[in-house]
Image (cartoon, helix red, strand yellow):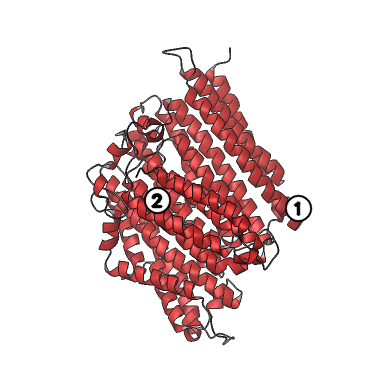
Amino acid sequence: MQAYLLEIIIVISAIALLLTEAFITPKRKYRIAILAILPLTIVFVLNVFAVAPSEYNKEMTQFYAWDNIARFFKGFTLLATILTLIFTLDYRRTLSKFTTRPGTEEGTGEYYSLILFACAGMMWMASAKDLVSLFVSLELTTITTYILVAYMRRNVGSLEAGVKYLILGALSTGFLVYGIAWVYGATGTTDLALIQEKITDQNQNYLLFGVALILISIAFKVGAVPMHLWIPDVYQGAPTPTTAFLSVASKASGFAIAIRVLQPFMESGNQVLSSKFTTIIAVLAGATLLVGNLAALRQSNFKRLLAYSSIANAGFLLLPLAAWNSDSALASQHAIAFYLGVYLLMTFAAFFVLAIIYRNTGSDEISAFEGLGRRHPTLAFMTTIIMGALAGLPLTGGFWGKFFAFESAIRGGLWVPVIIGFIGAAAGFYYYFQIIRAMYWRESLSTRQIRIRPISYWTVKGLTIAIVLLGFFPKPMEWLIGEKPTSAEKAPQKNQDQPVAVNTAN
Amino acid sequence: MASLNDYLFISGLLFAIGLAGVIIRRNIIVIFMCLELMLAAASLTLVAFSRFHASSESTLPHYDGQVFVFFIITVAAAEVAVGLAIIVALYRARQTINVEDLTSMRG
């Protein structure tokens, strides 16, 4: 099956769900989520067996890359979307409180199909090999997430978060388009594979300007420093499933396009450009690590803490990107893919715990965790593992993620960001362990039993087990990503013999 | 006839005005207009490059840039539709469209 059909299936099922929504009674809107998980699972399986569009299909191959990076990021997005839908199933009571006719679920039906549209956009981003398709798919994702953030329109926090996200998102779109215009002007093409051949000494300054502008908008997408200001407020105000979706899927697709955009410049052999981009990204990584970790230290709200943790993680993820040069391309992409894989497990688990605590205590504060060790020992134990993994405790998956990131940065000789990263990781131990301290060393005033829905309970359990297993055996993940060439989801026999650069250049 | 540099200067100016407006102004509608100005600046840059790129082989312009402008216009329209809806919803809830009043979250 040709790869571009994957997105087409997702878009068609999203439209079909939007139409079906009209015929489902207001009390049963959650059925749309269950219906939506079905095509996502099918596409997740098909993603493993998909093949590149044929050479003769020029209209497709010009805009659509199919390689190991695309396969990995598509699988990643699909998994994140499925988890978001499961999360929404659990969260729908809160969501329905702030939409049309509070309490009836009547206004929640569109939420599920919007997530599918965003998913399709992110899948296209993973395959974007032309600046035009990159722009359009990025906007499909961004505009859909504006709605997802502001979805609880009877809640002032959600609306404010929506407006803030809208303004900064539109600003980053402006930077992206202006940057693309300059890259186009300098090279006369929007095809990323052709740009590599057109880098000369005359146009490299224009290219530097254009790509720097594009990098600003990528920084918005991944939550890195010059454009990180939206993260805390938007994460706090948005519905929690949207927050988890933004934090995982949106960040990952930001890195997917970062890899796509930087590839022609990092591997062109033009020393001036590649060394300048290395410096720019290393500075961004250092600043992001500093801001994210230091600001997280003084948070008392768990949702905001996770927001700053998401900024800090963007910093760790930028390290291998900065260490990218033509020799270490595979190692860098591998480190990014591994980190993202572990990050998905940890972050979703943390947000599920947050939602459970919120439903039981009505609060996002860290103080809401007090006494959890006695009130629900199993959940407290799982939360301990999740927080340990986020901090990078050895024997959890989080440790290997940080290990590979630091390894590639050290090999790239980026000492200053690496030292900042070590300080940040040490700070991480402090602020993540605040939660553990609250759970075991503080007594709770309430002794009411913590109630968890089975679906959340088993999802958190599964994610926690996966985190621990990855800590003991990081190999399965490497095998999943594809050890030899680069990142690829689940044993890509067909692409094994083709290096990425060749594949995108056709 | 105006040269490529003239167009680039004007579009750079438009972009700078838009960016300054986003940073300085406090009314969300005005900020939104400034954001549209930035997109217009990018469109003008693209069209200018597209017109002046052709030179060597033929007198036809290099059409990629002009087609891209259509994509930008379409996306901008979608963005405005969603954006204004969110701003209207915010106005109904808060009776204000001033960014300085958006302070329900702190930390």
Q: For the residue marked with disc 2, what is the amino acid?
A: Lys
- In the drawing, does residue A481 fall left or right of residue A427? left
Residue A225 appears in the rendering: no
Residue wearing tag 1 = B96
Say what secondary structure mark 1 lies in. Answer: loop
Q: How many marks?
A: 2
| Circle 1 residues within 10 Å: few <14, some 14–19, many ≥20 | some
Residue wearing tag 2 = A74
- In the drawing, does residue A230 fall left or right of residue A137? right
Q: Quadrant of the C terminus of chain A?
A: top left
Residue at image position (55%, 54%) is: A17
Q: For the residue marked with disc 1, what is the amino acid?
A: Thr
Residue A89 appears in the rendering: yes
Residue A22, placed above or below residue A359: above
The x, y position of residue A307, in whole percent, is: 52, 61
**Farthest-out residue, right:** B95
Q: Looking at the picture, tell me which residue is in the foreground, A366 or A488.
A: A488
What is the quadrant of residue A150 in the picture?
bottom right
What is the quadrant of residue A157 in the picture?
bottom right
Residue A226, placed above or below residue B44: below
Say what secondary structure mark 2 lies in. Answer: helix
Q: Chain of mark 2?
A: A
Q: Looking at the picture, tell me which residue is in the foreground, A117 or A217.
A: A117
**Farthest-out residue, front:** A23
Circle number at residue A437: none
Residue at image position (46%, 17%) is: B54
Residue at image position (43%, 55%) is: A78
The x, y position of residue A91, in whole percent, is: 56, 67
